[in-house]
Image (cartoon, helix red, strand yellow):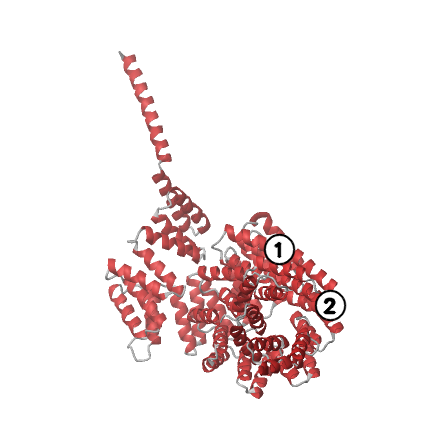
Amino acid sequence: MASTIRQFRNVSLAIGCTLALIATSGCKRDPNVRKQRYLQSGIDYEKDAKYQEASIQISNALKIDPNFAAAHYELAKTYIKLSSPMLAYQELMRTVDLQPSNVPARIDLGQMLLGGGVPDRAAEQVKAVLAQQPENADAYALRAAIEQKKGDHAAALSDIQHALTIDPKQANFHAMLAVISSSVPQETGVKPEEELQKAIALDPKSAAAHGMLATLLERRGDKAGAEQQNLAAVQADPKSLEARATLAGFYVRNGDKTKAEAVLRKAAQDMGDKDAAPELLRAFYTQSNMGDQAVQTFAQLAGSQPNSVPLQLAYARTLLQKGDFAKAQQVADGLNKTHSQSPPVENLNAVLLVHNGKNAEALDLMQKAVKAAPESVPLQLTLASLQAQAGNTGAAETAFHEAARLDPSSLEAQGGLALISSRRGDSTLLAQVANNTISLHPDYAPAYLWRGTAEANQDQTEQAEADFQTAMKKDPNSALAYAELGQLRLKQQRVAEGRVLLEQAVEKDPNATQALNLLVGLDLGAKQTDKALARVQAAIARSPNNGILYNDLAVLQMGTRDFNGAVETAKTAMRLDPNSIDAVQTYSQALAAVGQSDQAIGIWEKWVSAHPTDARAFTMLGTLEEAKGDSAKAAGYYKKALQIAPNSPVAANNLAYLMVENGDSVDVALSYAQTAHRGMPKSTSTADTLAWVYYHKAAYASARDLLEDAVKTEPNNASAQYHLGMTYLKLNDKANAQLHLKAAQTADPSSKSAQEAGKALAQLG
């Protein structure tokens, strides 16, 4: 009997063990248990400030359950710690979509939207929170910040005071009250310094409160007290890069760059795993013109932390700034061994490829990189720049728009859009970009220049002048501001004032090519060619390594028919800037002018071999072949350019003109001519071509209207005068026909248009 019982117990024990194993195995397979374990693991890593590891673990939880709201919120907080605001924003949006009742997520999202310059959308989050919790102090504080941003200081003051009645022990509320009360013109009864002291008393580790108090004391002239508070901010939160940057800024403002450098260097050393810290130090060196010191410092920092990708990248970028591409390539080679797929490393590789003349490879690399990481703003910006260099304006604009969507505060994205819209003559887009930028960066001087330019283009003279004056106040050393205002004065026929402003622009910056070119134009208009040449040569003497200036000189030499001199000068421009398509264009035109058209064509054939997606290059090949008289080859090149960039105005214009001259389809030519005129609405050339197509379609009234405007703008355009004369013949207005045909002969007696005009006059008798 005993043996039977013992045997039964053994069976029971075996069954129990089996059940335990099954239960354990079941737990391991249960997705709910697994996702919770990953989430908790991520939270534990967060507590240890291991944010990269935390993001991996939390992402693993989301792979199991993509709708796990708690994990999305935790991942958002981790991304904030990793200084990845766009990724954090996406996770916060996903959180509130999945869990609308998550009040902390809504508050965080609102703060991020406010910081991103969209206060109205931030206000939507406040409204949603107050609908759930009418007395939520954080919501009132956020609404106060929104109202402060919009300039409604009284409402902001009321809301932050209400937040304090709900929760008087919130340190950041007291700090916010101090800031807001300082903005209210009338007496509020609030003493900002006392409120900041309360904030510090409640939270001695509040770096923000110490920093605000430092700012207040500095404004009052208490520099010793301000320094003490800035140091206290760093001590309160040693991991706060903002606190260290503020301290460095204090030292810079007070003329102590040595201490500023020490602070930023220590930050880069302590926070070498974050992109922002090394970049802050690099920016300091750039602004202080301390290139040699920058190379030395980053060489030491990168050497002491060889596994820090941000420090290695900062070192490589510093080398690039100094023109040491060989060493930069060595750094890139090291990074490629371990981080070749990292977006910043891919960016670096693209820059080096461009330097080596491998633009097509660089563009291909960026297209693949953006496809793999479409949310990367730096990649989008690099792709946009490469597309622009390749002449793919539409693709460049798309990439700049995407970068601006991802980061509305990106000045590089807005600047790229401004440049594209300016070149295209799109004043509507230029004004829109300017207004967006001003709303986010009200002290950014170039944005006022963009808006002023758009206004000047639309003949809104008073508004343009006001914006140019604002830009000059925001940045008194902006040569471009003087140049733009000078150009406006010329447009107003106030030539003497305009000349003075343009001279001031060149004095401030010898590389101010816009002002220089306008002055050269004035010299040429006054038939002072020698003065124009001397002016450009003087600028080159002040800035001898500026390829743009050499290109300008070559263009001027072309205008004075010194074609051999232009060839040599353009060659120098190409040597200084091998990737300048403008220099290549000038060089090829100079070669063609001295009878070396085949060599000029060979230059462009070599260029398109290295830049197969450069529409402008194919357009130039078409122009050269057209000049040689090979219209079939020319048309082929223009079509190739339009395959790459369908809205390319020059290629479309030239192809349309060739088609009507060769008797091809007028309807197809009309489509191309309309594309060209849309792209360059103020161009006499595109107006002339479109009018000539209308002429061939017997739409003589439409042709006349376009050509009348064209010759008013450019009375010495022989082609437009000839076409207008021929149009008046079709309208049976012989007097005007003779007038404009003779004008064509006078404008350029040796041109084909003048010769054709002579034939027409002879037939008229």
Tell me the crowding category of disc 1: few under 14, some 14 to 19, or many 20 or more residues within 10 angstroms, Cα based.
many
Q: Which x, y percent locates residue 144?
A: 31, 68
Front residue of 289 and 518 = 518
Q: Which x, y percent locates residue 194?
A: 33, 73
Q: Which residue is mark 2?
A: 591
Which amino acid type is shown beneath numbered disc 1? Ala
Q: Is residue 421 left or right of residue 565?
A: left
Asked whether residue 558 appears in the rendered view, the answer is yes
Q: Which x, y percent locates residue 379?
A: 52, 57
Q: Quadrant of residue 354?
A: bottom right
Q: Which residue is mark 1?
A: 360
Residue at image coords 30%, 54%: 102
How much space separates mark 2 and mark 1, taking CA atoms?
26 Å
Which amino acid type is shown beneath numbered disc 2? Leu
Quarter of the picture holding the N terminus: top left
How many numbered discs?
2
Q: Which x, y percent locates residue 492?
A: 52, 85
Q: Are marks 2 and 1 in contact (CB under 8 Å)?
A: no
In what element is the residue under mark 2? Answer: helix
